Image: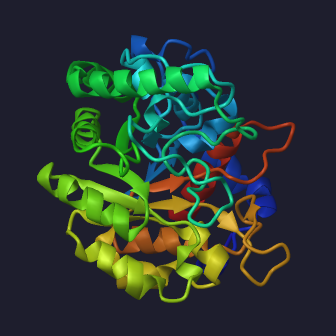
């Protein structure tokens, strides 16, 4: 692959997978044993993942492994096997591992980290105006529709909401520090904790930032809105951390930057963007580097994915890396060449072939990024 092919940002996955350079890239990656069944035991004698290339930290997010439904140790195992040395850790399984009360059974529903506290308003139905996108609050998206709660289930949920709030307010930070050590011992750093706590009580928002700090993260993440920035910005500032706000397709809405983004960033210097370049490019057709240039010091991290553009059929659709129109190479080279301090996280959203797995696909994306950056 020549420099011109890289510069235009259209690295063909077919070409990538078929080149001798790919063989070199894969051979250079640490060989990781698939038998990592007890990550808490440490990484002694086991190759550590390394996905930092020429100063650019490539990582992933828990959502990339959603089909595994793995629990927190399963997330770590998947990271190591995919050669990811950095993660945006979503809330799934964290509180379970740390000894929180169990969520009452109700068929399909979020785990403890995604359950709103007592008194929180009900979720907007999916697809309705103002609905929270699946996974936006930190939990794995449900695999199907959710039936209304029976009176008995509602009573159990109300009881749980009170119990989890009480547990959070008394939770020992030592358990979260142990979780950090488990990840670090395996060679994986946690740079964001996605609690999505905007609807929590003040005490629980403090808990979100305290636990994130205990786990080594520099930021807590939530979805991008002016209300969320106003709610969480002061807490992030008080804790000396960042609230990283994740965009979906809002940039395609007329007036969004002036009416929402700029006022949100003006709330506090602790408010930054968790900038999703795929959602941006797929919905607007614009180059993500425009936003990086305009808001360079107000971006904390990037989400990486490949999508078709808004005028392609199908529009704004997730694609295997290299088969869409998102200029991944342009963005990664900008981060490298300008030494921008952004963690760059793979968010695996394209359909996985029957012969593959999410771990294999994330590992391929890591190698794809490596070939661009080295």
Horizontal and vertical percent position of residue 143: 73, 38
Here the colouring is rainbow
Q: Is residue 116 above or below residue 254?
A: above
Residue 372 drawn at (x, y percent): 57, 64
Residue 186 occupies which quadrant of the picture? top left
Name the side, left or right, on which 110 lies relative to 194. Answer: right
Q: Is residue 364 left or right of residue 259?
A: right
Q: Is residue 98 above or below residue 225?
A: above
Residue 53 place in picture, x, y as percent = 45, 54
| x 49%, y 44%: residue | 138
- Judge whether residue 15 can be spotted in this image: yes
Q: Quadrant of the N terminus?
A: bottom right
* Relative height, residue 25 to residue 243 (above, below): above
Which quadrant of the view contains residue 294?
bottom left
Residue 157 or residue 316, whichever sits in front: 157
Residue 374 in view (yes/no): no
Question: Residue drawn at (85%, 77%), measured in percent from left and top?
Answer: 313
Give the x, y percent position of residue 319.
75, 62
What residue is shown at x 25% (from left), y 42% (from top)? 209
Q: Quadrant of residue 36?
A: top right
């Amino acid at each position: 692959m020549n420099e011109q092919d890289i510069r235009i940002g259209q690295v063909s996955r077919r070409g990538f997978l078929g080149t001798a350079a790919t063989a070199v890239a894969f051979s250079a990656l640490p060989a990781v044993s698939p038998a990592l069944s007890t990550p808490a035991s440490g990484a002694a004698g086991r190759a550590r993942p390394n996905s930092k290339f020429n100063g650019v930290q490539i990582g992933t997010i828990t959502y990339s492994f959603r089909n595994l439904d793995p629990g927190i140790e399963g997330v770590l195992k998947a990271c190591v096997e995919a050669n990811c040395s950095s993660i945006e850790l979503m809330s799934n399984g964290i509180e379970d591992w740390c000894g929180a009360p169990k969520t009452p059974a109700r068929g399909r529903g979020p785990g403890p980290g995604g359950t709103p506290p007592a008194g929180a308003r009900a979720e907007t139905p999916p697809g309705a105006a103002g609905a929270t996108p699946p996974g936006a609050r930190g939990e794995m998206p449900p695999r199907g529709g959710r039936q209304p709660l029976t009176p008995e289930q509602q009573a159990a949920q109300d009881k749980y909401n009170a119990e989890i709030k009480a547990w959070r307010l008394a939770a020992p930070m030592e358990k979260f520090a142990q979780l950090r050590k488990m990840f670090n011992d395996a060679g994986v750093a946690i740079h964001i904790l996605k609690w999505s706590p905007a609807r929590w009580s003040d005490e629980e928002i403090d808990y979100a930032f305290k636990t994130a700090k205990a786990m080594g993260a520099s930021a807590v993440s939530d979805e991008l809105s002016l209300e969320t920035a106003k709610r969480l910005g002061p807490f992030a500032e008080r804790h000396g951390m960042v609230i990283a706000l994740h965009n979906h397709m809002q940039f395609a809405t007329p007036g969004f930057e002036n009416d929402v983004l700029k006022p949100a960033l003006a709330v506090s210097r602790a408010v930054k963007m968790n900038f999703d370049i795929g959602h941006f490019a797929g919905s607007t057709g614009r180059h993500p580097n425009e936003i990086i240039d305009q808001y360079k010091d107000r971006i904390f991290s990037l989400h990486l994915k490949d999508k078709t553009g808004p005028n392609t059929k199908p529009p704004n659709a997730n694609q295997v890396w290299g088969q869409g129109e998102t200029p991944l190479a342009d963005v990664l080279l900008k981060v490298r060449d300008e030494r921008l301090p952004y963690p760059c996280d793979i968010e695996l959203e394209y359909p996985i072939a029957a012969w593959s797995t999410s771990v294999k696909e994330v590992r391929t994306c890591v190698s794809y990024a490596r070939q661009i950056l080295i």
